[in-house]
Image: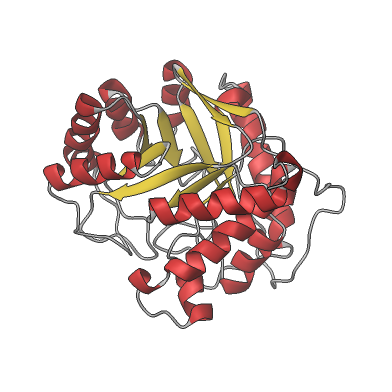
Amino acid sequence: MTAPDEKPNVAGSSRSGTRKSRTTDHTYGKQAWTCRDRNLVFDHEPLIMGILNVTPDSFSDGGRFLDPTHAVEQGLRMLADGAAIIDIGGESTRPGAPPVPAQEQIRRVLPVIEGILAQQDAAISIDTTSSQVAEQAMAAGACIINDVSGLTQDPAMPAIARTTKAGIVIMHMQGTPQSMQVHPQYENCLTEICTWIESRVEKLATLGIARACMVIDPGIGFGKNLRHNLEILHDLAHCSAIGLPVLVGASRKRFIGAIGHAATPAERLPGSLASLACAVMNGAAILRVHDVPESLQAARVAAAIRQPERWAEQ
């Protein structure tokens, strides 16, 4: 899913490591993310991005929201519960998931985007690697492109992002959804992830996309094993040092189940909240989650612990 001249990582044996030149003193207070005509502000606590999969095969909620009416209701519910963004996807990116044609993705997501925006002014993100899907979603009122390939799979995607001035999520993934979990390897996990993200940021900037429109995502679970995921959360501040807001999506993922002995995604809320709190303590600005009210409360408490000086004695 990467362009031939842009290899995200170098294969080799995995070992822990961080970029020694980076500092760990980062805050997300007063940062903003420009998404078309919106400015999403991270004012001392992270934003919640609610996950809305309109797919039959997503790992956690596949099939639950295939009916557009039910999907719209779920999107509105997450907004009422405190989500700042709704991330709508019509193609599963779980390990081994097959590609979905652009027209089928469009058929799935457009009625949901239009249905939510008909009832509430909201920041809508389209989760896709297809420029056709992104273009149609932007026309329907979406303002963010969340592309798990880091805008590399579809050569036309950067132009859509530039012309629409959409907010973009630049995510790192080793391989493709079909191959990414087949023995992922790194010489130095965080260094390779951050180096690749920095190169993509620079490349996209040369293509005319403003840095103010960019958010970065280290891609937990996308071409990473359990140890890699833990290293990312432990050393997330090294991603923050790139100088852009960091999005983290660990919600209900397999590594949480492996550690917490939770076989099904529905059993992984406690571990998801633990991962979320760690991400917030290390500077995450946006949290992509399934469980909005629980995640929002956990994020607010973690943010308060991270910056206790903001709270008066009570």
Residue 65 in view of the camera: yes
Going by the picture, which residue comes out furthest to the right? 21
In the rendering, at what x and y percent does residue 303 appear?
A: 63, 48
Along the line of sight, the residue nearer the viewer: 163 or 34? 34
Q: Quadrant of residue 26?
A: top right
Q: For the point 46% across and 47% down, which residue is it?
A: 148
Q: Is 110 situated left or right of 206 in this image?
A: left
Q: Quadrant of residue 192?
A: bottom right
Residue 182 in view of the camera: no
Going by the picture, which residue comes out furthest to the front? 314
Q: Quadrant of residue 199?
A: top right
Along the line of sight, the residue nearer the viewer: 156 or 286? 286
Q: For the point 34% across and 31% down, which residue is it?
A: 134
In the rendering, at what x and y percent does residue 181 appear?
A: 48, 68
Q: Is 45 situated left or right of 19 in this image?
A: left
In the rendering, at what x and y percent does residue 48 appear?
A: 47, 44
Along the line of sight, the residue nearer the viewer: 53 or 300? 300
Relative vertical location of residue 201 with respect to residue 10 in this rendering, above or below: above
Q: Is 224 situated left or right of 233 in this image?
A: left
Q: How many marks?
A: 0
Q: For the point 40% across and 65% down, which residue is it?
A: 95
Q: For the point 67% across and 31% down, which residue is it?
A: 202
Going by the picture, which residue comes out furthest to the bottom? 261
